[in-house]
Image: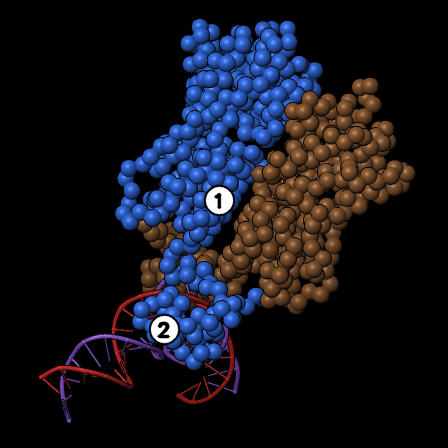
Chain colours: A brown, B blue, C red, D purple
Amino acid sequence: MKFEAVTIKDIAKALGVSTSTVSRALRDSYEISPETKSLVLECAERLNYKPNPIALSLKEKRSRSIGVVVSEIANNFFSQIINGIESIAYDRGYNTIIAQSFESYEREVLNVQFLASRSVDGLLISLATETTDISHLKALSDRGLPIVFFDRISDELNTHKVIVDNFRGAYNATEHLINMGAKRIAVIANSEFLSITKDRLAGYKEALQVHDIKENPKFIHHCYYGGMVFSEIEEVVNKLFTLKVKPDAILTTSDKLTTGILKTLKRRGLKVPDDVALAGFSNTDIAELIDPPLTIVRQPARDMGEAAIDLLLQLIDSKRPVKEFERRMLTPELQIRESSMVHHHK
Amino acid sequence: MKFEAVTIKDIAKALGVSTSTVSRALRDSYEISPETKSLVLECAERLNYKPNPIALSLKEKRSRSIGVVVSEIANNFFSQIINGIESIAYDRGYNTIIAQSFESYEREVLNVQFLASRSVDGLLISLATETTDISHLKALSDRGLPIVFFDRISDELNTHKVIVDNFRGAYNATEHLINMGAKRIAVIANSEFLSITKDRLAGYKEALQVHDIKENPKFIHHCYYGGMVFSEIEEVVNKLFTLKVKPDAILTTSDKLTTGILKTLKRRGLKVPDDVALAGFSNTDIAELIDPPLTIVRQPARDMGEAAIDLLLQLIDSKRPVKEFERRMLTPELQIRESSMVHHHK
DNA sequence: TTTATTTACGCAAACGATGCCATCCTGCAC
DNA sequence: GTGCAGGATGGCATCGTTTGCGTAAATAAA
């Protein structure tokens, strides 16, 4: 089954003029007489003519579409980011093509190449957990494809970057737990290769140090797949709660980790926050509905998406190669609820 | 900044052969001598040649991409569906372009036309709340664009459809509430124009009737935007709980409604399930974490996505116009938790 | 009237890839 | 030596659109 669209030729034939005339009339060129213009416009309307963007892309070497690569969209943080991206892209006449890496390096490379080969005008990407080598992005960047990183960035490519102040977010959450009376704060973080993990871990450590709490290596754990693999989480919780000296609070660094840890704690019969307090990064809209209501570090995801697409469109629109790159850092918000109230119920 | 890719011409020039030769060599045509073939292949590899899908789309009038229109991706149900769609599309070499209608008719029409003009080979769509007129889809369908409906369907277009047994889902949930002892079950449903609303409401009513409970019009409410506008929800809860005879249970028909209602009930100081029981459609992964753990009707979203893309690819691949259309109905699952245990705490 | 200038349009090339048709060459049979 | 088959390749049109250039007719200036 094929789908035949009305082309400029159909209009030309119907009116007995050339395709150039039709094209120019539609683009409102000064070379075309008002009468011809209105004739063409009327005919285009009548036949329901829609310009073929594929043909345009071929000719202009631009597709008016941008690619977005995230680890997965079934994640509040990323879907909110995408909403931010789309809202601006849409207004500027750009289409957004969304691809999911599912934390897989291979899948990320394939997605990126697919998008590039489909002539996206630019790329927004938050790296997959598995990704340590970004030569696939470097190659495209070198060949002129505008790329903007957000959330999970890499220092190995010099381009615009949009992040939140991950250090500050983790610092504040940790300090809050300390202020609540926690002494033995464990952290369950994502893969140590991710930029966000490094920053968040640094914030956690700094808060401990400032408050004279000694860092305990047994309290620091990583979940390589960040909660996508549930057994990872169970294993970590198991390690933590078979220690002689158990943690009295946990900081988690991502949405899936936060809810995954809470699930596991509950299944083990541990009470939050009485047995162990919990605070973590999350962008869920129902933190207040959870038992106990969750203390979360919330990222301005929509703003991040908007900032990222804004920077990308700047790159795309710039006439000459951009040398100066910006690093926009947004501020996360600590929303305090019961899950972190260490002594609240005691 | 533009992005120059290697073309077939570059290879032809480098080797001193014609573009046709290169093209045929790359497609492994029998007409080309083995020596030339290996020469071309080696050169293509060396220059990192990637075929330009835009040019191919123009020539072949197919883009190897399919469009997906949902109301919003920041919704577990839809993002799970999309994951199902993508997993199959990806394997079959199709790219997925996701568009969000945000329940707006205007936005849906724009999205659909954008996708069509970008030569998607087919369309998967779940209608927006506002959509009552589907002539924009009919027109495309008539012109040969394969379309498959899922979730929110319309009878006005004869094509493949994938849904869950909404009647059964609502019936089972309602019957469960009745079995738990509820006598005055209110229902808070989406816009009455949506197909899913009609079916779910019918299931609710049937369960009441079978169990000899008289239907009370004051207990039946609609939220036109299905929870996207929070004031809608508050208004409905207000109406229900200023009644002389208040409901002892509530059935909700969508994710946002379920969590939105729970939020509102809590803010009003109503205890679930002691003051009022709650059961609703939802695909959240953290129903067990919510206070109280939520009884939900869960749809096999991933399966729905897979079924939909499967049917769509069948349409796309079929040589002759398809006349017989399928309606696949999957079975929802009732997950029983505390929120519906009417007498549990009494 | 002749020569410039403007107006309004058509022709054809281009974008990247494909595929039909034509062409050239080699080898073989008559 | 002529004819022909067939292998290997090049030429060209095509998809839909834009755009530089050319040009006819109409108008203005000489």
Crowding at dot 2, Cα within 10 Å, few <14 / some 14-19 / many 20+, comes out as few
Q: Position of residue A31 (x, y in %)?
A: 48, 68
Residue occupied by mark 2: B34
Labels 2 and 1: the sequence-earlier one: 2
Whether residue B106 sits left or right of residue B144 in the image: it is: right
Q: Nearer the viewer, residue B105 or A21?
A: B105
**On the picture, is B210 further left or further right than A83?**
left
Q: Nearer the viewer, residue D28 or D15?
A: D15
Residue A313, relative to residue A295: is it above or below?
below
Label count reads 2
Q: From the viewer's perspective, is residue B124 above or below residue A11? A: above
Q: What element carries label 2?
A: helix
| Label 2 with label 1: CB-CB less than 8 Å | no
Residue corresponding to mark 1? B86
Disc 2 versus disc 1: nearer the observer: 2
Quarter of the image where the N terminus of chain B is located: bottom right
Answer with the quarter of the image where residue A280 lies: top right
- The spot of residue B174 in percent (x, y) is 49, 15
Q: Of helix, strand and loop, which one carries label 1?
A: helix
Q: Residue at x 58, y 42 (%)?
A: A73
As drawn, B324 above or below B27:
above
Task: Classify mark 1: residues with Cα within 10 Å, few (<14), some (14-19) or many (20+).
Answer: many
Q: Which amino acid does label 2 sit on?
A: Pro
Q: Where is residue B285 in the image (x, y as percent from the top left)?
A: 58, 30
- Label 2 marks which chain's residue? B
